[in-house]
Image (cartoon, rainbow, N blue to C red):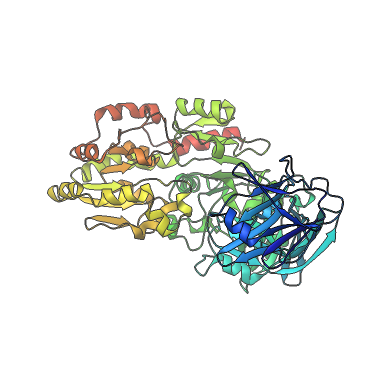
Amino acid sequence: MKITCRDHTFLIENLPHQSLQLSINEQLIPLQKIETAFVLSIDTLLDIFKKKNHPVKFVDKSGKPISFKHLSEPLDIAPNSYIKQGKHSYFIFIDQDYELSLIYNKKPSIMNFYDQDVLFEGITRQDDVLLLKFSFHSKYFEVKQPHCFIKIRHQEQKIALPINRFNVTPVDARRFKTEVEAVIEPKLVEQLLGDRYNYDAFNANIYDLMFGFTIREMPISGFTPRIRHFKNHPELLNDEHWLSLNEQHDVLVRPYSTVSERLAMRLIPVPVETVKYYADPQPLLGLDPNKKTIICFEYPDKAQDNGMIFFKYLVDQHQKRFNIFYIISRSSPDLKNLVGYENHIVFYKSPENIEVVQAADILCHTHSSSYALPFATYHTEALMQTKQKLFLQHGVIGSKDVSHIYGKKMPHPFTDLFVVSSEREKQLIARDYGFHPDEIIVTGLARFDHLITVRSRWLKRYKNRKKLLIMPTWRPKLDTYSDEQFMESDYYQEFQALITDERLKSLVMDNKAEVSFYLHRNFQKFSHLFHSDFVDVISQDAFTVKELLENHHVLITDYSSVGLDFSLMHKKVIYYRPPVLVGEDNAGESTDLLPGDVIETRDALMESLRESKMPKKFKRHLSHIYAFDDTKASKRIFEAMQHHFQL
């Protein structure tokens, strides 16, 4: 087939058909044939199409689409073979069903022009840059210029990678193979990290890789498909590529295959001295080789949860028997919580961080054990699998299923020993999370020792305190929104309306009370969007969660596990769940184990706030959620760990 475009007219030649028609809206519109060419003029097109449409098919006299599935000779399509006049544009192309089509005022999709086989081929180093290699097969047309883009997941901006070189090779009458090398350079990484990036922190961003291309024959859509990376590809294990970022830091560029077998990357800046130590480790801390080494950690920038409490217990009670360390970032505001334990602190991303993890026998984690190291590769993940792990948790697991996060997941289990707070919770973890009962220990949570210790003191000292804390949890996906998008969400509008509600203001003023509003760490970046003339909107660094819970006497939350912490201090918890905020993840969730009333309307919430004491029925139910009323959880955890791991 040959297609040219002259004087705003399509000329279609070399078709083995006596007639050619357009099938549109169940009508067949014949094309005029002049000598050897079927003719489709701008005048005819203007009569046919009045608004942007989906593609329409060319058919033969019997109404059968014109197919190129068994193409034996290359197409002869002239450059710029499309019509554009004013606001009107028309494109002829072969669709994904191999059928000749036409579309009006919409560029044909790139999906029609390649075999949907774009494949990651690996990363190599060239001087001071990395070359990302991928290949794909274009259909019918030779690629004029390939493109490669990198994008932070859930964000809009795409950044183009420079193309170092590309090569196009004809394969057969229908296909061309294109091999591409895109450049990853230091200034690109710095652009992705941004001006405000904290080099001491963990970079949680995921970077997706996409591609596109242009052809000479016509413009095609700007949609950029994800590059594929199959889990059986030989490059899967070659995932450790270091790039010099600046004088202080190198960056690990780690490609990996996602669940859907697409190419994604992690970009992890690491101090130069740590990278050197990783390549050539030498003793730094003088660890006693006759002692087992135990490491505790939470998020890299946190020391305020079960990890910190259990760490302090270990140092206070067992430092003569074990090498004990806590991993935390150098810039963490929680360092103040570790005063007096400085000799047992290892800074995140330091050479000592690598040393203690390599030497560790037990990893005590409150979230993922991967937070122990500043970066993850197949090499370090293999190292982590040699370590015994104790999951300290950061809350009691109720009816909400989080097994996709904390399930055992063989052959690389999430943890080896799972801390729970009751027989009910143990049965749940054994039934739904894949752990054997012997791998689950009913000990209670370390941080509850402190809560129970201060409970009686708090009740005496602050029994007349009138401080209300509003502390909702976060919502998946909303944390990726821009400020403008977040302000349009039901979440923002509901809680902004609550903290400006005149009835709440009157209640506060009449009782000379104080109200604080505190967002989950994943939503802290949106704190500046909330405003009220009688509610204090608190930033993450102003107080720890523990301090907030201790200093308030009523808590309003929605789903957060801090409700149990609060209730263990015998203080009132209200679960505020208006219907607009109940997502699919929470719909139908049992409320039997909640230590407070579930309230769905603001009217009912205002009524509930007239009483500030914890209802007796919830005090009686606490033992079903948390089996202990003592301060020995850390001791029980240690003894169970000692027995299970034969320390």
Quarter of the picture holding the C terminus: top right
Quadrant (top left, top right, bottom left, bottom right) of the N terminus: bottom right
Name the residue located 66 percent from the left edge and 53 percent from the top edge: 102
> On the image, which quarter does residue 569 sit in?
top left
Describe residue 2's horizontal placement relative to residue 385 as left or right: right
| Residue at image location 53% in from the left, 67% down from the top | 194
In front: 339, or 149? 149
In this view, the residue farthest toward the bottom is 247
Camera-side residue: 642 or 212? 212
Tell me if I can see residue 113 in this picture: no
Residue 266 horizontal/vertical position (percent): 62, 57
Q: Position of residue 233 (x, y in %)?
A: 77, 48
Compare residues 327 and 29 and report the one nearer the observer.
Answer: 29
Left or right: residue 185 compared with residue 299? right
Q: Is residue 164 left or right of residue 587?
A: right
Figure check: 537 above or below 246: above
Residue 516 visible here: yes
Residue at 63% in and 45% down: 361
Question: Is 18 situated left or right of 372 in this image?
Answer: right
Q: Please state the horizontal and vertical placement of residue 440, each as a whole percent of the image.
A: 54, 30
Percent x, y for residue 577? 33, 38
Number of numbered markers: 0
